[in-house]
Image (tube, grey):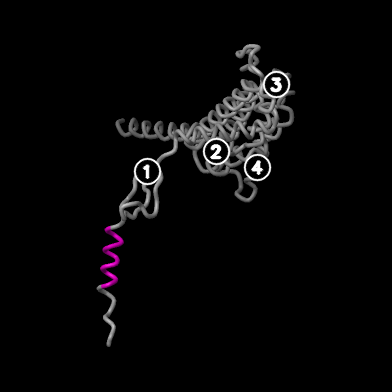
Amino acid sequence: MFANKERTKQMSEKNFTEFKKGIWKENPVIVQLLGMCPALAVTNSATNGLAMGLATTFVLLNSSLFISTLRKIIPHQVRIASYIVIIATFVTIADYSLAALFPVISKSLGPYVPLIVVNCLILGRMESFASKNPVPPSISDALGFGVGFTWALMVLGGVREILGNGSLFDIQILGDYWEPWIVMLLPGGAFLALGIMIGIIRHFTRKPFEKGVQMKDMVGYQEKGQLVDTTSIFQAESQTEEKSTPPEKT
């Protein structure tokens, strides 16, 4: 009984680890720069970013569930084609559901919902994770990357909407004094906002990095965020070489 509890605890910790990595550490937009087409094209408002993120999460989650379940059945030779068929099925469901329930948002997103089929984020997670792992960690992985993708698009869309329209989720938050930055609603504004957002996040989350030769004659390399001093190792190797080298005959 104790062994079962321990096993359950380890599985829960593993699933949580798979979930949280996609939210921040391996965020598909901020870190891996995946799915740039929808990230730049539809994020002129927070609503569009949220809708695209949720649609992508729906496809990612259900595709991971199916592919993980069928991973031992799908032939290796036709796995990519099989993944695309499964992904396209859920993209069609998401596209038709948006058109029926939220026609204004569906029209605003345009062709980018059907283009989720070729989103490298989804196909990449299917090939690298869902097809090689059981259902629980695959679901955790899909949820984590879906949440990470959604918040990145929503924040990017929110920033562009505030600066471009003075509103957030179509609610006016800046008064008449605000002069809208029209460029933020244009394609160039998407690149500008995304670059600034990535730069700010990486500036405040970066770790000190040192490699090669350090001052004060310390030579080392980085391991787990700390500099490992290899000066003594190099000195020992040099002494060994000197001893093993035969003296020259005169």
Which of pointers 3 and 4 indicates the residue nearer the eye? 3
| Residue at mark 1 to residue at mark 3: CA–CA distance | 45 Å
* Disc 2: which residue: 68
- Specify the amino acid type for callout 1: Gly
Is tag 1's residue or tag 4's residue first in the polypeptide sequence? 4
Element at label 4: helix
Residue 240 covered by magenta stretch? yes
- Label 4 neighbourhood size at 10 Å, few (<14), some (14-19), many (20+)? some
Question: The C terminus appears in which quarter of the rendering?
Answer: bottom left
Distance between the alpha carbons at the discs numbered 1 and 4: 41 Å
Question: Where is residue 217 shown, x and y percent of the image?
Answer: 31, 55
Q: Quadrant of the N terminus?
A: top left
Residue 127 percent across, percent down from the top left = 57, 44
Tell me which amino acid carries mark 3: Ile
Residue 225 disc label:
1
In this picture, residue 24 sits left or right of residue 237? right
Circle nearer the viewer, 1 or 4 = 1
At horizontal 60% and vertical 44% (from top left) the residue drawn is 74
CB within 8 Å, label 1 to label 2: no
Mark 2 or 4, nearer chain start:
2
Judging from the image, what secondary structure is the residue with disc 2 in? helix
Q: Quadrant of residue 62?
A: top right
Q: Secondary structure at mark 3?
A: helix
Query: Which of these two is toward me, 129 or 249?
Result: 249
For disc 3, the marked residue is 105
Q: Earlier in the sequence, mark 1 or mark 2?
A: 2
1 vs 2, front mark: 1
